[in-house]
Amino acid sequence: MNIREIARLAGVSPATVSRVFSRNPGVNKDIAQRIMQIAAENNYHPRISEKNKNVVIITPYDSVYPVQSCIDMLLMALTQELPKHGFRVEILPVNSLERLPDIRFCAAVAIGLEPSDLQNWDDMYSEPLIFLDRAPSAAQKSAKNIYYVNSDENYAMEIAIAHLKERKHNKIGCIIHGNPGEGNTSKREKAIRNALKKYDFPTDNNLIYFSGKGNDRYVELTGKLLKAGVDALLCPGGNAGITVLYALSLYGKEVPADVSLIASEQTFFSNYAVPPQTTITQEHQPLAQTVVSLIEKRMNGEKIPHITTLPYRLIIRESVK
């Protein structure tokens, strides 16, 4: 399959096909969509020009700094890694997504967004879209230009709970940041339940909670878990490390003397808390390096995997007894 064959199937000139793939304005929208559809049906990926090395990073909000969440840490890793390979970076909040058709880019990276937020990508763009920290939805598993780079949530929950088992804990309470069905929350709940069962910990419903959005419920949920008699807390996602430490102080509990704590790594906080916090962490720089490698391979016309999964890491500090 080449541009001339696509032009013949679409009933247009090769120059029109070329203009669509190079994202030049002035092509009728219906014609452009027909060309994109033919390319997708025939598994055709146009070579990306070496001159076009703009990468659009699509974020879920306007705020970028200060770095506080895993989304921001992934963003920082990408903005450090992409320029090393000659790529230019444009950050586009999802609430400005209408600008995307007017931007010339060789690839887009979505951080903290759901696959449903960017539907019909293949109908609109020939450039690759890489979702970071997400798994494909059922509807998008067959997409030609959408790829996924994520971290192994099952492994993360298991290494955290295995560490608490090694340290002779008896009852673990869990607060999963977010609401069920959003992001990786449901996957984390399932992984937590499986790991608790594997290491002979109780899995009662009153030991596993979702925080909802924000930090408002952490004090209440921490109190419920203390009342249930937990001797350790596992709190993945969000800013749970600093929030739960504050909540425990309100109840007069010390870490780790009274309760051990494992949270998600926060680059500019976890190591400087009192005590320094044991955390699970995505490998942010390797994730960014993987994204760059996939983009470069697509630019070279190489076939790349649609899903790439990297392991988490357990950082052992002083918050576990």
Image: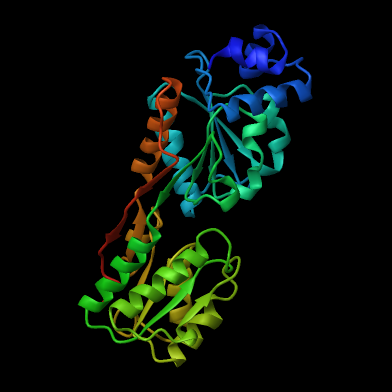
Relative to 143, say whether 5 is above or below. Answer: above
Give 107 or 190, whichever is nearer the viewer. 190
Side of 95 relative to 173 (left or right): right
Q: Is residue 171 left or right of 250 when viewed as pictured?
A: left
Residue sitting at 50 percent across and 50 percent down? 71
Find residue 29 and report its image quarter.
Answer: top right
Residue 161 position within the rendered picture, expressed as x and y whole percent measured from the top left: 31, 73
| Location of residue 231 with respect to 34 vertically, above or below | below
Q: What residue appears at the point 37 percent right and 48 percent down from the top-left corner?
A: 309
Which residue is found at the position 62% from the left and 21% from the top? Answer: 104
Where residue 97 sits in the image (x, y, percent)? 69, 37
Q: Position of residue 178 (x, y in %)?
A: 56, 66
Q: Is residue 255 visible?
A: no
Quadrant position of the C terminus in the picture = bottom left
Q: Considering depth in this image, is 64 or 5 the residue closer to the camera?
A: 5
Identify which residue is drawn at 59% across, 39% down. 58
Q: Is residue 57 above or below residue 8?
A: below
Tell me: residue 282, above or below residue 170: above
Q: Quadrant of residue 10?
A: top right
Q: Nearer the viewer, residue 254 or 190?
A: 190
| Number of numbered labels in the structure image | 0
Residue 54 x %, y %: 53, 23
Q: Quick check: can you spot residue 116? A: yes
- For the rendered model, the colour scheme is rainbow
Left/right of residue 239 with respect to residue 191 in the rendered view: right
Q: Nearer the viewer, residue 74 or 101?
A: 101
